[in-house]
Amino acid sequence: MDILVVGSVAFDSVETPFGKVEEALGGSATYFSTSASFFADVAMVAVIGEDFPEKHVEMLKNKGIDTRGLTRVSGGKTFRWTGKYDYDLNQAHTLDTQLNVISDFDPKLPDDYKKIPYLFLANIDPELQMKVLEQVESPRLIACDTMNFWIEGKPGKLKELLKGVEMLVINEGEAREFASEANLVRAARTILSCGPKTLIVKRGEYGALMFNGNTVFSAPAYPLEDIFDPTGAGDSFAGGLIGYLANTGNLSEENIRKAIVVGSTMASFNVEAFSLDRLSKLTLDEINNRFKSFKKLTHFEDL
Ligand code: AMP
């Protein structure tokens, strides 16, 4: 196994200006691992309830994802998230969050999971992220995501967690909120002083920015004509990013730049359909072709 991820597995009810779904498959660990599975072997730590259909677990297994760490709680209800997007698709509005089985989850990693070299702490309760971090044995890379729900709900735990994280991947609005700073460059400096060496800021349709020491790198998002549902774009981005880093085993800044474009490529597919409908049917050829289009999109000659 190359990558260990802990995060949510969810039923999402989502409305965008282009349609809606009720109780569709979602969750940060689900999107992340499906996306990363195109590049590397992924093992998942998450919790589901009795109500979670086996066909969704089968979909993950068919992607080669190791689901031994996916715990089913008998009598429990799966995590549920209800969200809405207006015409500004960069901004998700949470209408309801039901933690359900996530509230009492106490993950115990199988022994072989503890030695997996790349760890991604996907968006979930920072106390749970910490419990996983405490069990692993010196991974090569520890990366992390979070969201406003936890920044507002458990800021102290999050700050403590960040001391042990090397790469933080979060949304632009959440970076500003976490740092209590409207200017993104200053917010990045504040966040980097909390522990992470690298900060990657996801900016929806405006792409992504990386702050690494004194350098900044900017990647665009792919200009798409048909966007249906941005849910999971951030997790698919992170899946492509960490998946590519694990695949190449190269953590140089040059390679992180390339991995960010792989992440943007995966996010661009994910938003073309609701839930995991696009990601689950994606092929490596499609990924390669869109990556090439990204290169053309950003290419320009010297003066
Ligand atoms: P994103 O990639 O940022 O669009 O993340 C979307 C996913 O995050 C959805 O599939 C939700 O199920 C999941 N999610 C929403 N709120 C939370 C939360 N508080 N904790 C963990 N996962 C969440």
Image (spheres, grey):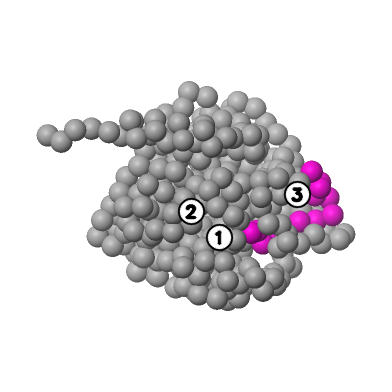
Measuring from the top left, give residue 49's x and y in whole percent. 80, 56
Q: Which residue is mark 3?
A: 57
Task: Read off the magenta span.
Answer: 43-55
Identify the residue under disc 1.
2
Instruction: Kindly tell me whether residue 118 is visible in this rendering.
Output: yes
Residue 178 x %, y %: 44, 60
Residue 50 is one of the magenta-drawn residues: yes
Q: Secondary structure at mark 3?
A: helix
How far apart in space, not on screen, are marks 1 and 2 (Cα)? 8 Å
Give the residue drawn at x 72%, y 67%.
105
Q: Check the image and report above or below for 82 versus 130.
A: above
- Quadrant of the rendering where the N terminus is positioned: bottom right
Find disc 2 in the rendering and name its residue. Answer: 247
Residue type of the residue flagged with mark 2: Asn
Whichever of labels 1 and 2 marks the residue nearer the N terminus, that label is 1
Vertical placement of residue 292 versus 38, above or below: above
**Crowd class of label 2 (few under 14; some 14 to 19; many from 20; radius 10 Å):** some
Q: Earlier in the sequence, mark 3 or mark 1?
A: 1
Query: Position of 135 compared to 214: left or right?
Result: right
Q: What residue appears at the point 63 percent right and 42 percent down from the top-left corner?
A: 83
Indicate the quadrant where residue 107 lies. Answer: bottom right
- Callout 1 environment at 10 Å: few (<14), some (14 to 19), or many (20+)? many
Q: Are marks 1 and 2 in contact (CB under 8 Å)?
A: yes
Q: Is mark 1 within 8 Å of ligand 1?
A: no
- Amino acid type at circle 3 is Val
- Horizontal side of residue 144 vs 219, given as left or right: right
Say if disc 2 is inside 8 Å of ligand 1: no
Q: Nearer the viewer, residue 108 or 151?
A: 108
